[in-house]
Image (tube, rainbow, N blue to C red):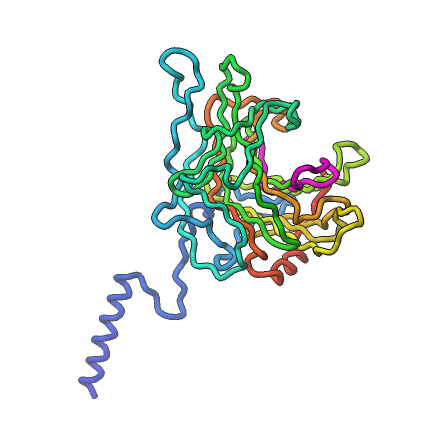
């Protein structure tokens, strides 16, 4: 018996030595999880706040915290093509500084058994951006952009391109000394060729947003052309301006007049590192396909909800008289200057919106049961 006990103790001691060597804890003790750089807040660091004063809480790890799709072995946005020669002077232009900050690498996407994805554009260098998106082009208010903005939207690969590691870049370039007004502020305004297509679903984008004076990135929705603005609606999912790192989740279906004030709803969420990581934005909708008026417009009443990093931040009912949600398209652009930016002009340089992933799914992660639960605890949109 004693020899058996001695042998058992030797095995036990050997196991404990191996556990210590490999940092393995006994069953029942939880090893502290290391948080990813992009979601970590340190003691004394400013914590992002919700617009109602509630502290920002990171969503729990698990099925609702799906990572952006990433090609295996290539997981960070690093390489950028050189900016084009916009100068006519001999010898070419001076280098254009890139104001976009380094992006924390995102881990490869885990195997997901969540809702079916029914649209996901491929951001491969050999595929032109125009395969999935239409380039809207033009400079200034005569083209209908409004807000006294500065940018000239182009289809140039200098302003929108795919990277070798599977990202879509929407790049705004400021060269304030250019004699040609069309070349001073160039950018891209992309409109998806696909519509939301379904009466219920979820649109997801993983974005790193440029933050600087005079810069206004946006990820948003409009009805498919032709449409009547603003009556048929507008949804803003991710937008920030002048580097304030405040995300504005919005629903609009009226003019900016006192009588239409209640038709502009918004919730602001402070995301202090939106320019340093891939922030996950979701827009989910549940609208009955048969809820249409005789004129073909929405009868209203469908439920809309906005999420940031898996947390619901705003909800609202679909307004009557807007375009049915199936007919809406996705827009990605970086605007410059104008009324929204309070007349600020960006410094010379390149400003990148990095689209790490984009997709439409049949439901939110966690299913419609999760959506219904989130609806009970989410704030309504507030009148602007």
- Classify residue 5 by image quadrant: bottom left
Q: Tell whether position 225 is magenta.
A: yes
- Give residue 29's position: percent from left, percent from top: 40, 67
Q: Tell whether position 324 is magenta.
A: no
What residue is shown at x 73% (from left), y 44% (from top)?
322
- Classify residue 104 by image quadrant: top left
Quarter of the rendering occupied by the N terminus = bottom left
- Classify residue 146 by image quadrant: top right
Quarter of the rendering occupied by the C terminus = top right
What residue is shown at x 77% (from left), y 44% (from top)?
321
- Give residue 206's position: percent from left, percent from top: 50, 45
- Give residue 71's position: percent from left, percent from top: 39, 48
Which span is picked out in magenta? 223-247
Is most of the magenta stretch helix, strand or loop? Answer: loop
- Give residue 182's position: percent from left, percent from top: 54, 19
The answer to whether any part of residue 381 appears in the image is yes
Q: Is residue 162 left or right of residue 371?
A: left
What residue is shown at x 45% (from left), y 19% (from top)?
86
Which residue is more in the foreground, 223 or 312?
223
Which residue is more in the foreground, 323 or 306?
323
């Amino acid at each position: 018996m004693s020899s058996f006990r001695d042998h058992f103790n030797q095995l036990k001691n050997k196991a404990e030595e191996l556990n210590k060597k490999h940092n393995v804890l006994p069953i029942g003790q939880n090893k502290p999880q290391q948080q990813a750089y992009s979601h970590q807040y340190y003691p004394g660091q400013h914590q992002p706040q919700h617009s109602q004063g509630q502290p920002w809480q990171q969503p729990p790890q698990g099925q609702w915290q799906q990572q952006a799709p990433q090609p295996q072995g290539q997981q960070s946005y690093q390489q950028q093509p050189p900016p084009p020669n916009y100068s006519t002077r001999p010898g070419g232009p001076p280098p254009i500084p890139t104001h976009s900050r380094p992006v924390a690498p995102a881990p490869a996407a885990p195997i997901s058994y969540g809702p079916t994805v029914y649209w996901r554009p491929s951001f491969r260098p050999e595929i032109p951006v125009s395969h999935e998106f239409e380039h809207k082009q033009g400079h200034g208010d005569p083209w209908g952009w409004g807000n006294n903005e500065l940018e000239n939207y182009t289809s140039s690969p200098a302003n929108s391109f795919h990277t070798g590691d599977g990202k879509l870049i929407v790049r705004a370039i400021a060269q304030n000394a250019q004699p040609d007004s069309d070349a001073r502020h160039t950018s891209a305004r992309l409109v998806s060729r696909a519509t939301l297509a379904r009466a219920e679903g979820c649109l997801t984008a993983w974005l790193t947003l440029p933050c600087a004076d005079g810069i206004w990135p946006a990820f948003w929705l409009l009805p498919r052309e032709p449409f009547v603005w603003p009556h048929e609606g507008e949804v803003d999912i991710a937008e920030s301006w002048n580097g304030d790192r405040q995300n504005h989740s919005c629903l609009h279906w009226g003019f900016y007049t006192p009588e239409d004030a209640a038709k502009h709803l918004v919730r602001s969420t402070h995301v202090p590192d939106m320019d340093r990581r891939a922030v996950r934005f979701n827009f989910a909708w549940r609208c009955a396909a048969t809820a249409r008026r005789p004129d073909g417009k929405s009868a209203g009443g469908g439920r809309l909800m906005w999420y940031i990093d898996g947390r619901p931040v705003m909800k609202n009912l679909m307004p009557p008289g807007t375009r049915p949600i199936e007919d809406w398209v996705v827009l990605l652009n970086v605007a410059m200057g104008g009324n929204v930016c309070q007349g600020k002009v960006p410094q010379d340089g390149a400003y990148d919106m990095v689209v790490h992933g984009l997709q439409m799914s049949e439901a939110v992660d966690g299913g419609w049961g999760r959506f219904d639960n989130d609806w009970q605890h989410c704030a309504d949109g507030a009148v602007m």
